[in-house]
Amino acid sequence: MASPASSSSLSEADLVLAKKEHQRLRNRLKQKRHRERHISEREMLQAQILELGQLLTAVSRRGNATAQATLHRLRSEYNATRHVGEAMTAWVASMCTRVLPLAGTPFGWTKTSLLADPAARKLGLDWFSQHLYHNTDRMAAYAQFPSTGAVVDNVLLDVGNGHLDLVGRIQVEYDLSLLETYDALKGPIWSMMQGETGVYFSEFLDTELTSAISPDKMLYRRNVRSERETNYYVCREFSTDDRIVFTFGNFFQDDRLPENVDWRPRMFWYVLERASPTKTRLRVMLYNAPYLKDGKMVSWQDELLEDHGIDCSLLDPDVAFRKCQQLTNDECDPKLHEDYAALQIQNATGLA
């Protein structure tokens, strides 16, 4: 039979053992919880890695696609700009190598061609019409208008070597404000610019380009005068607070259309200017340079011989010139006076 001391000792040993077992159990449970938490965190991190990897791949693809699109756009813009630059360089070179104008003529840029390339074509239409506008004052000075009074006549200006510039002049003064005069005359003037009052049929061209340059204020048209000659007219309206300018002029050649063998530079201005709050002045300048036939400028003496059978070598020079002036008036006066009448406010269809 065990002694009390032995029984007590066993109980203590069992108690210690039980405590250790309990501690081990607690440790195992703690380790299990740590392990489970570690596994859970690892799985969560792995899921995040996978998700972020997929996101990064998608971002990279989008970024690459955006970069590729940007690169493609920049290359396209570069190629387009280079193409236009090359076309405009060739255009400028062709103008610079032409025969220089006569010393007496006011314009050295009339022999201008319009290129076929759409971008260069748009620039050419804009440039030439702007050039006409910015030479308005120069043309007015060349036409030698009186400061006041009504004018309707033709002026022949000697530019040397037997060549003449012809300027048809109209000057009218109105007892109306600039805007009132504009409202009354814009219809008749645009009718003239559109070729509605001329004898040759006009075909309108490049309407999308002219609308992009100056909506409702610009057009480009051609009228065929003969198999050898076509007018390629660009027409445009410009305005400031004190002046409204309608202008149009013809290109020497249009690379998309039949080539001119014969050609005359023709440039026209209709200028409304504010004289006072209640007065407006209109000046019309109809400029015609010497004819070019087969690339050669024709003298007025040769024109008289070819068109009228008059041999100027048999006449006194002053008599021959007066004859030239008379024939010019006979030819031009009817149309000039018709335009003058159409520009009287009481006759203007634009008057409200």
Image: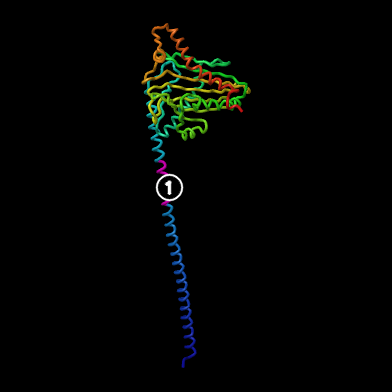
**Crowding near pointer 1: few (<14 within 10 Å), some, many (20+)?**
few
Q: Nearer the viewer, residue 352 or 19?
A: 352
Percent of width and height locating residue 32: 45, 72
Q: Quadrant of residue 298?
A: top left
The residue positioned 40% from the left and 43% from the top of the image is 72
Q: Which residue is mark 1?
A: 66
Percent of width and height locating residue 155: 49, 15
Percent of width and height locating residue 268: 49, 22
Give the main secondary structure, helix, strand or loop, of the magenta stretch. helix
Q: Nearer the viewer, residue 93 or 62?
A: 93
Which span is picked out in magenta? 60-74
The colour scheme used to paint the residues is rainbow
Residue 138 in view (yes/no): no
Q: Is residue 223 above or below residue 79?
A: above
Q: Quadrant of residue 86?
A: top left
Residue 187 in view (yes/no): yes
Q: Secondary structure at mark 1?
A: helix
| Residue at the outermost bottom position | 1
Tally the marks: 1
| Residue at the outermost top position | 316
Question: In the rendered structure, does residue 72 fall within the stretch colored magenta?
Answer: yes
Q: Nearer the viewer, residue 117 or 294?
A: 294
Percent of width and height locating residue 103: 42, 16
Question: In the rendered structure, does residue 79 fall within the stretch colored magenta?
Answer: no
The quadrant of the rendering that contains the C terminus is top right
Q: Nearer the viewer, residue 122 or 6?
A: 122
Q: Is residue 36 above or below residue 86?
A: below
The residue type indicated by label 1 comes to: Thr
The residue positioned 48% from the left and 17% from the top of the image is 332
